[in-house]
Amino acid sequence: MNITIADKPFPESGAIAVFSAAKKTLSPSAKALDKITKGALSRALKNANFSGSKGEILELISPGNGKLTRLVLVGVGDPENLTQRTVEEIGGAIAARLQTSGEKQLAVVVDRIKGSPVPEGAFAAHLASGLLIRSYRFDKYRTKEANKKKPSLKTVRILSHQSKQAKVIFAVAKKVISGVFLTRDLTSEPPNVVYPKSFAKIIKSLEADGLKVEILGEAALRKIGMRALLGVGQGSNFESQVVVMRWNGVPKAKMTKPVALIGKGVTFDTGGISIKPAEGMDLMKWDMGGAGIVVGAMKALAKRKAKANVVGIVGLVENMPSGTAQRPGDVVESLSGQTIEILNTDAEGRLVLADVLWYCQQKYKPQVMIDLATLTGAIIVTLGYDQYAGYFTDDDKIAEQLDAAGKITGDLVWRLPLSENYDKLINSQIADMQNIGGKGAGSITAAQFLKRFTNGVPWAHIDVAGVVWSAANKPLWEKGATGYGVRLLDRFVADNYEI
Ligand code: BES
Ligand code: MN
Ligand code: ZN
């Protein structure tokens, strides 16, 4: 979808969208269009069940003298409640409604909305972002889709007197959204297409955006000593990979320690010998979702030339059962030297992250490490789908930063506890630790496990198992990969770690 922002005047033909606040409070442009159509809009409002709530849409087909193909009235709800995210969701609602409507072009007329904390220019920009984000589709493998179901809407013009401000905001947002789309692509691809080596190759292609990319194959990983990570991949025919991305946006003279972003990239998680049930196992293609977020965020940061030093590291493995697979009962010595008794081969993500976290802090001396992982089913029990990701940290400052970034972007996060008593639950009979806790607190014991590999570096772990994939169409995505987390990390860096 091609989205442009321009000044008024607004057109009097084609498809036009205008706004209404709650209680059918029409915007000036909506009132003007009502006049042009000789009251078609107010007549429709009398008969339709439309109140103007957020994202609500009333469509008039060929009103007035027929020059207009569509008049679309879009609810914004109570203007006082508008935020970046809600405005995006309004844009998303427009895209969802009109994408396959048959209309090829749409003009969206933005006026100042009384009582809105979001200024008109920002409103126009966030609206554009929402339209763009919602227009994403992963349809490369559909060869027989009916024309009626294919997107018709190709161009959208957002019209506002504040187009100058809007253009500046949207130009940056578009770069970040290119990262969101990459994350969605990676997460959506089937596991025979995105496997560790092909994933690494896709990351390598980001050098075109200015990232430095280093790929470590199994020979290198063995030499380094990432035995916990290699153990997870040893049952697979695919070679495990660790990929390091670097974005250096700070001039040499002002050198700062990097921010580190670390992602779990299990390209398919069968559970290994502790195999998962057949039903729904296909979904474990998105067990690389954490790595997908890190890669998308690195792309976003590079595209918008963030003034920060950031290192992104992803551990890419496939967890398969086979004659060479790891067994429940095996003991591995991790890169850190700490030994781990594997009691369940399905608790594999933490083994991957253990070595990557240790490697990261040893090699890159980061000021902060954030890891993202589809780590536990338990986090879905706790927080459900499509709402909050759960995070863990001992550092109140990082917690505040994550909370703030979540509130602004709408990629929400909720803090959960760490403590010594939870930590004890992963002590092992025969090794330094075991890779699972007892019956309860599954997400917390997983986080405690990771903490043992951070070596005291300020760190947060974000369990994204409930938010990277959605079974439902929502204002900002068609069901499937959500792209959650890219904008969270981008904001987290922008607001706290740029010079
Ligand atoms: N990748 C899964 C977690 C997961 C489950 C993500 C469902 C998304 C949806 C992870 O590797 C896993 O299998 N965790 C186990 C841990 C258990 C064996 C301690 C789990 O959550 O069941
Ligand atoms: Mn697993
Ligand atoms: Zn997993």
Image: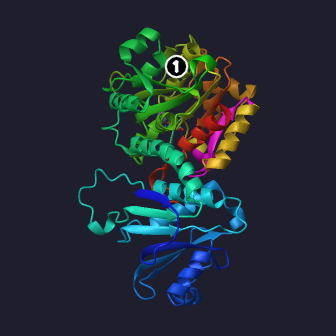
User: Is the shortest distance between ligand 3 and the CB of mark 1 under 8 Å?
Assistant: no
Q: Which residues are magenta?
A: 380-395
Q: Is residue 82 left or right of residue 313?
A: right
Q: Quadrant of the N terminus?
A: bottom left
Q: Is residue 412 left or right of residue 92?
A: right
Residue 479 lies, in percent from the top left, at: 45, 56
Does the segment drawn in magenta span residue 384? Answer: yes
Residue 404 lies, in percent from the top left, at: 70, 43
Depicted 115 relative to depicted 12: above or below: above
Find residue 282 and report its image quarter.
top left
The answer to which of 132 and 320 lies nearer the viewer is 132
Does the segment drawn in magenta span residue 129? Answer: no
Depicted 185 relative to depicted 336: above or below: below
Disc 1: CA contacts within 10 A as few (<14), some (14-19) or many (>=20): many
Depicted 360 relative to depicted 472: above or below: above
Find residue 432 and report its image quarter.
top right
Residue 311 lies, in percent from the top left, at: 53, 25
Q: Is residue 443 visible?
A: no
How many marks overall?
1
Q: Is residue 110 visible?
A: yes
Indicate the secondary structure of the residue bearing disc 1.
helix
Q: Quadrant of the C terminus?
A: top right
Mark 1: amino acid: Asp
Which residue is rendered at x = 50% and y = 28% of the image? 344
User: Among all residues in the image, which is located at the extreme left?
Assistant: 144
Asked which colour scheme the image uses, the reply is: rainbow
Residue 128 lies, in percent from the top left, at: 51, 58
Depicted 428 relative to depicted 177: above or below: above
Which residue is rendered at x = 46% and y = 15% of the image? 227
Residue annotated with mark 1: 355
Q: Is residue 122 left or right of residue 101?
A: right
